[in-house]
Image (cartoon, helix red, strand yellow):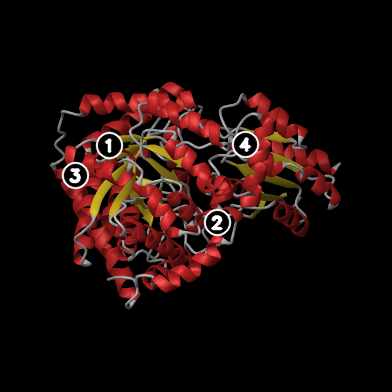
Amino acid sequence: MDAPRIVLGVIGADCHSVGNTILDAFFTEAGFHVVNLGVMVSQEEFLDAAVESDAAAVLVSSLYGHGLIDCEGLRQKAVERGLERLVLYAGGNLVVGKTPFEEVERKFKALGFDRVFPPQVELAEVARLLRADIEARRN
Amino acid sequence: MTSQRLSWKDFLAQRQAVLETWPTGRDVAALEDGLRYQRTIPEAKNFAKAMAKAKAAGRTLLQPRAGVALIDDHIRLLRYLETEGTADLLPTTIDAYTRQNRYEEAGRGIERSRTAGTSLLNGFPAVNHGRDGCRKVTEAVTKPVQVRHGTPDARLLAEIALAGGFTSFEGGGISYNIPYAKKVEVGQCLRDWQYVDRLVGYYEENGVSVNREPFGPLTGTLVPPFISHTVAILEGLLALDQGVRSLTLGYGQGGNVLQDLAALETLRELADESFRAAGFIDFDLTLVFHQWMGGFPEDEAQAFSVIGLGGFVAAAGRVEKTIVKSPHEAMGIPTKEANASGLKATRQVLSMMADQRICADNDIVRREKELIRREVHALMDAVFAAAGDDLVQGVVRAFAGGLLDIPFAPSMYNKGKVLPIRDNEGAIRLFAKGGLPLGDDIMAFHRERLQERSRAEGRPVTFQMVTDDIYAISKGKLVGRPK
């Protein structure tokens, strides 16, 4: 099987570039084909890249607190673009202020994200889940 | 080496277009109105004067970061930080949409925050609130207030902030572009900041002191002192060229105490030397030390220790100001209580250190100081050589050629070839120098220090070490050792 294609990027007006560099290096090393859009990526740019690269998953990062506003409507737009099977992850410091993670997770799942991660997540675990989710969505 | 002062005619021509970019620009059309208003601000609330006073008294002032979407909430937050938090200086941190001149989105953020009953923006949208909104804020508190942001094109923000009673403005044409933006051209951003500095120069010419603070820590991620020093000095020179007088240069905590102390001493010395060499005499130079700008431990007790170590270095390094972190740093933006507790923790260290002098005159600090001096000179010489007769062009060409290169920065105009790693004692060294114009002897020292760590850990120096170092402090250590 070809390396699963994934799109990475930091959404909105967020310029946190360090974690993005690490994610790119990690997922590439873990055997994924990474299309990294870097920082300050709009919803449209995420979906354009997903369509162009025929990606199985889009991993959205947000560190600056505006994540909720920036991510609203992304799932609907993906469906409109014919990406019904797209696996959608979000991770980072997703809202303003210290909030119980369960609450953050609930909000982002309501927006149509498949999985939501705090910044301290073990990346190897994310890679394992991502492979499984991509596989499940294919069938 | 200098850059041209923006002519008053060109400034006014630009100004007209700048003020039209958002309706609140109209309220600051009369420049003299801002001047008149600034003259009514009591001296105790002037940021530049507070910094000069701290320098004369050998004191370190405390400042938090803080900003929320709505005016009344923002005032409540600042009042809490100056009373409960005992802050000496106050911030107004600007939201990320405003930083990108996306005022419509900032406006939606304001509306959504009203409905939600909590701030959905990560800062105070000063342009949307306009001159009168800013005046409400600066009048409601007793301490000097500074605008802190990350805005590549901050011309309108500066106009509104100064007319709105803020007496200090953070940022610069390199430090608010390369670490904060993706596609902003280097020369364009430098010119936009010449405008900001020219505006500050106008206030200075008319007897109103306004403090300017280039953003020292850059990406806040393993930035070697000589890189941030070079940027700070270049931005200082560019600001002085436009008539700025009160300059606060910054450095972000690296974590190795002796390297940090050497960095603070050399920043003051090198900046002073460079400004005088360029012919400036009438300036007021102060320093700001930023507590650790990288990833924090989630555990609040551990976070307080990181804050405390930063407080110690600020005191030992005898800086005029320190920017304080909070125990919520790992989770993002702190509550007002957490923010105040970071201030109080730092206050305790500073008070205990106030009457002590830490002697940093030892072999290691001398070695580090000498190294930083040589590295900064190498970079400055290369930028000057590339400049012709215009420092702005020197900086543009230096980034294009990789002579200046900031680790982990998002800008497409940054080469991104420099990779830093900690040595066996946690000092920040270079693994890859990219195009930085550093001599072989300097690089041999960096390599030697990294090889020592490599031997101690029994693994080669690779990108994995960089990753481990980036997350080390958040996991309770300074050096990212293998598991």
Dot 4 and dot 3 within a common chain: yes
**Which of the pair A31/B60 is nearer the observer?**
B60
Pointer 2 with pointer 4, Cβ within 8 A: no
Q: Element type at marker 1? A: helix
Which residue: 63% across, 40% down?
Answer: B110
Vertical relation: A138 (above or below) B24: above
Q: Which of marks 3 and 1 is in front?
A: 1
Q: Position of residue A8 (x, y in %)?
A: 65, 49
Dot 4: within a 10 Å radius of its alpha carbon, few (fewer than 14), some, or many (20 or more) residues? many
Q: Nearer the viewer, mark 2 or mark 3?
A: 2
Q: Which chain carries label 1?
A: B
Q: Which of marks 2 and 3 is nearer the N terminus?
A: 2
Dot 1 and dot 2 within a common chain: yes
Give the residue furthest to the bottom.
B388
Give how far apart the Cα atoms at labels 3 and 1 are: 16 Å
Which residue: 28% across, 56% down?
Answer: B245
Give how far apart the Cα atoms at labels 4 and 3 are: 45 Å
Dot 2 and dot 4 within a common chain: yes
Q: Mark 2 lies on which chain?
A: B
Q: Name the residue under label 4.
A: B120
Give how far apart the Cα atoms at labels 2 and 4 are: 24 Å
Q: Report whether A124 appears left or right of B359.
A: right
Does any portion of residue B425 appear in the rendered image? no
Q: Mark 3 points at which residue?
A: B365
Q: Mark 1 points at which residue?
A: B314
Q: Which of marks 1 and 2 is nearer the N terminus?
A: 2
Give the image quarter of residue B315: top left
Give how far apart the Cα atoms at labels 1 and 4 are: 33 Å
Q: Name the residue under label 2.
A: B25
